[in-house]
Image: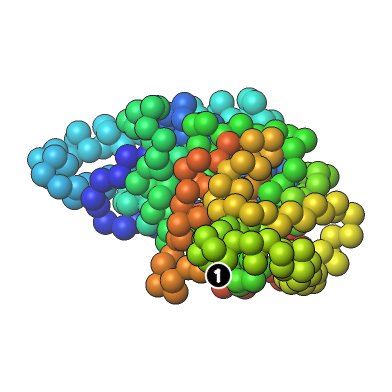
Amino acid sequence: MSEQPSGPGRIRSKTAGHIVVGTDGSDRAYKAVSWAAERAIARGLPLLVVMVIPGPQVGRTFTAMNESFQEQFKGRCQQRLNAEVEQLRREYPEVDVSSELVEGYASYVLAQASKDAAQVVVGARGRGAPVSVKLLGGVSDAVTTHSHGPVAVITDESWENQNGPVIVGIDDSNEARAAARVAFEAADLRKVPLVVIHAWDYAMIGTPWEYDIWDESMSQIMDELTAQIKNVFADVQAQYPDVEVDLRVIDSSPAQALIDASVDAGLVVVGSRGRGGFAGLLLGSTSKRVLREAHCPVIVTRAEQTDKKANGKRKR
């Protein structure tokens, strides 16, 4: 979606317990809308499709527009949103869908919705971004950075393997524990295995002449790491005894390990920041890179908000 300055704006419709998806009416955005509809049906949740447009006091361009033109513009946007919802109902007759046209900042509106929505879904880039540029758009980047709850990002390149495993990156941070909860719920709903990945590049923490010492100790280190990582998700695993878990402790950068695993996956879940992230950073380097390069949809979780929402099982 295209980001332009305006007043912040808010969704008037109920968002609590809904999957909320943003659209700008483009084919790219509809890929995210379709994904959100499938998730809403699978989880038995209502879907709210939101189109955010610039308000009447938007910079020089919109200030110069007369009231009649502004109403025409808003009417055309409403028509496009209505047409998209009708298409959605034809393709997914089971979905409980509503829509709303909101005037304001798209990133602000969707980030605010994440406070109580079951999940917010966004496309990677809007109508005007070139396909050849493998970057997140301004809206998706801002929503994942400032969200209060789980946000799913559906990129142009992402392909969801319906029978593929759910992948989750784990360390001993609170964000990783939140990601584990979301990932176990998703794997349980999809009836697929869960691949838990803990990646670390031990060659980066020593000097070349120390590598042979690391190699000699690696077996013991790997055993201890495996036990520690199992302990991180032991409580949530007990809630989902039917989920098959494949724990992998890998010598690699965390981002690259998750990107590689995403090739055949149905979903990747990652915390907003890992153990090594600075407290002031809202989105860490690993989650940023995974969002841009993963081959399947990605959900970014945030620890404190996810913990508040975890009152009973919530399926992904």
| Residue holding disc 1 | 275
Residue 129, x across and y down, in percent: 34, 32
Quadrant in which the N terminus appears: top left
Task: Establish if 58 lies above or below 314.
Answer: above
Residue at left 26%, top 37%? 71
* In front of the other: 223 or 125: 223
Characterize the local packing of mark 1: few (<14), some (14-19) or many (20 or more) Cα atoms within 10 angstroms: some
Instruction: Place residue 184 in its image quadrant.
Output: bottom right
Q: Secondary structure at mark 1?
A: loop
Q: Does any portion of residue 246 appear in the rendered image?
A: yes
**As shown in the figure, which amino acid type bears the numbered disc 1?**
Arg
Residue 34, x across and y down, in percent: 59, 34
Task: Establish if 176 lies above or below 87.
Answer: below
* In front of the other: 55 or 294: 294
Residue at left 38%, top 27%? 132
Q: Is residue 275 left or right of residue 56?
A: right
Task: Establish if 128 lies above or below 100.
Answer: above
- Scheme by which the image is coloured: rainbow
Residue at left 74%, top 50%? 195
Residue 165, x across and y down, in percent: 75, 43
* In front of the other: 193 or 119: 193
Q: Does any portion of residue 305 appear in the rendered image?
A: no
Can you name the residue that lies furthest to the right here?
242
Q: Is residue 9 left or right of residue 93?
A: left
Residue at left 54%, top 63%? 209
